[in-house]
Image (tube, coloured by chain):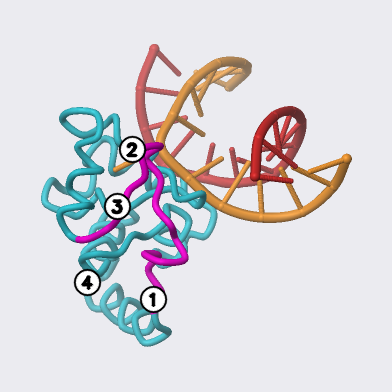
Chain colours: A cyan, B orange, C red
Amino acid sequence: MDFYKRVAIVCGQIPKGTVATYGQISLLCGKPRNARQVGYALNRKLSGEDIPAHRVINAQGFLSGAGAFGTPKQQKGLLEAEGVKVSAEQTVDLRKYGWNHTMDLVLWLREHFEKEGI
DNA sequence: TAGGTGACGCGGT
DNA sequence: CACCGCGCCACCT
């Protein structure tokens, strides 16, 4: 499914030190209603192994995917290693670390998808 | 083929 | 705020 390829490309654009939400990724992939599929893709590694999956959390700022990483709280460690503060409850302040993607990115993605034929 | 599931999200109370 | 319910949709049984 091309959607998974798009997920890989979009995730690759998340700046280090910031986090994006599942809904945001699905939106940027052109499928506003596929937030669940983003989680599914990352969980099953359907978009590749080497993508910053730790930077993707849910809309409430909670690290819902922590359990899929090696050890619980592994995701927390990865985020803190790049300067993202994670609370003891495994939550991140989206107002502070949330990814504010630009409209330019949307256009860039559009062209990139077109060029890749996905 | 039918029904259940889930790294989700939003609106209502 | 918290909690609840419902919509969502590709996958898996």
Q: Residue at x 25, y 34 (%)?
A: A73
Q: Residue at x 18, y 28 (%)?
A: A71
Q: Residue at x 21, y 61 (%)?
A: A83
Q: Which residue is mark 1?
A: A101
Quarter occupied by residue A43? top left
Q: Indicate the chain on which mark 2 is placed.
A: A
Q: Indicate the chain on which mark 1 is placed.
A: A
- Identify the mark nearer the N-term, 4 or 2: 2
Q: Indicate the chain on which mark 4 is placed.
A: A
- Let me know if marks 4 and 3 both belong to one chain: yes
Assign a secondary structure to mark 2.
Answer: loop
Choose mark 4 or mark 3, whichever is in front: 3
Q: Which residue is mark 4?
A: A116
The disc label shown at residue A65, or none? 2
Measure how far apart labels 2 and 3 are at the Cα level.
Answer: 17 Å
- Let me know if marks 1 and 2 both belong to one chain: yes
- Badge 3 crowding class, 10 Å Cα cut-off, few under 14, some 14 to 19, many 20 or more, is many
Measure how far apart labels 4 and 2 are at the Cα level.
Answer: 29 Å
**On screen, residue B10 above or below C12:** below
